[in-house]
Image (tube, rainbow, N blue to C red):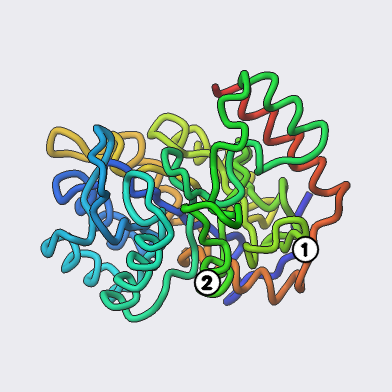
Amino acid sequence: MKQSITWPDGKAFAFTIFDDTDYATMDNVPEVYAFLADLGFRTTKSAWPIEAAAPVLSRGATCEDEEYVAWLRDLQARGFELGYHMASYASSRRGDTIRALDRFKQLFGGYPRAMSNHSGCIENIYWGDARISGMNRLSFNVLTALRYHNRYQGHVEGSDYFWGDVCRERIEYVRNFIFPDTNTLKAVPFMPYRDASRPYVNYWFAASDGAEKRAFAACISEANQERLEEEGGACLMYANLACGFYAGGQLDERFERLMRRLSRRNGWFVPVSTLLDYLRQQNGDHVITKDERHELEKQWLHHRLRVG
């Protein structure tokens, strides 16, 4: 079924990427972005503004690296959006989160408009079992053996990790649910949306699951590209572009081939916040209902348990 959205300039569909910055360095992502830029894509690259107080094994470059910052500024100048993936690669208390956002503004001219939580950070906002409600939350906690119960505290007033008021003041869009469908709008046709039960986030958005190169390629397979255009939909892809998309001095062959093919289609290729702004104009200021949220949570739980 064709979406009711009319895209700008006679475009048939929309496509963008929110790239979580995990593992990103100057060795593994610049070539990916040079390739995207050459094809005409403009997407959203998240960044960690500061180094973490506690070292962890899974990390990547931060904005304490001057060469990395220079490259990010060049990306921004070429029309890419810079987003937020928490203050750093490890948990940050309120003061460090505020310092990180201030540093982001200093470096890039404004606060990030769009963000995603980083799985290892205690200050994640409405994350773990706080992502979901009612019986869906109960099912999630049972199936995950309570591993995520009350673990994340960004929205918990009184916690050392609380920054919900700062999130509401400085950030516009926060990613939540991930779905397997290439057409993200099919799963959440009313996004971006508000959630009255989660008041520290201004607007939520969903994404399609392209976390690693195989899932990404499956999501934009030839058949799925054709269906996305036929449906007049939008794909907001969740990805970790540092994870195998460029290795051994070359781009992943299937990623390269499929993105070249996608670039030749009649798509609107803009950063995440640009797309979400347009959808807000089209859909209005939607406040999610309990029934809508229940259905989204059920779909997400099914996908979450399937992929592990």
Q: Residues within 10 Å of mark 1 (few under 14, many from 20)?
A: few
Task: Work out how far the residue at label 1 is from the one at label 2, CA to CA, in angstroms.
Answer: 18 Å
Dividing the picture into quadrants, the one containing residue 118 is top left
- For this orientation, the residue located farthest to the front is 158
Depth check: give the residue in front, 19 or 258. 19
- The residue wearing badge 2 is 274
Which mark lies nearer to you, 1 or 2? 2
Horizontal and vertical percent position of residue 254:
35, 34
The residue that appears at 68% across and 72% down in the rendered structure is 280
Horizontal and vertical percent position of residue 82:
37, 65
Quarter in which the C terminus is drawn: top right
Q: Amino acid at mark 2?
A: Thr
From the viewer's perspective, is residue 111 above or below residue 89? below
| Residue 158 seen anywhere in this rendered image of the structure | yes
Q: Amino acid at mark 1?
A: Ser
- The residue wearing badge 1 is 4
Circle 1 SS class: loop
Horizontal and vertical percent position of residue 66:
12, 64
The residue that appears at 26% across and 36% down in the rendered structure is 56
- For this orientation, the residue located farthest to the bottom is 109
From the viewer's perspective, is residue 268 above or below residue 2? below
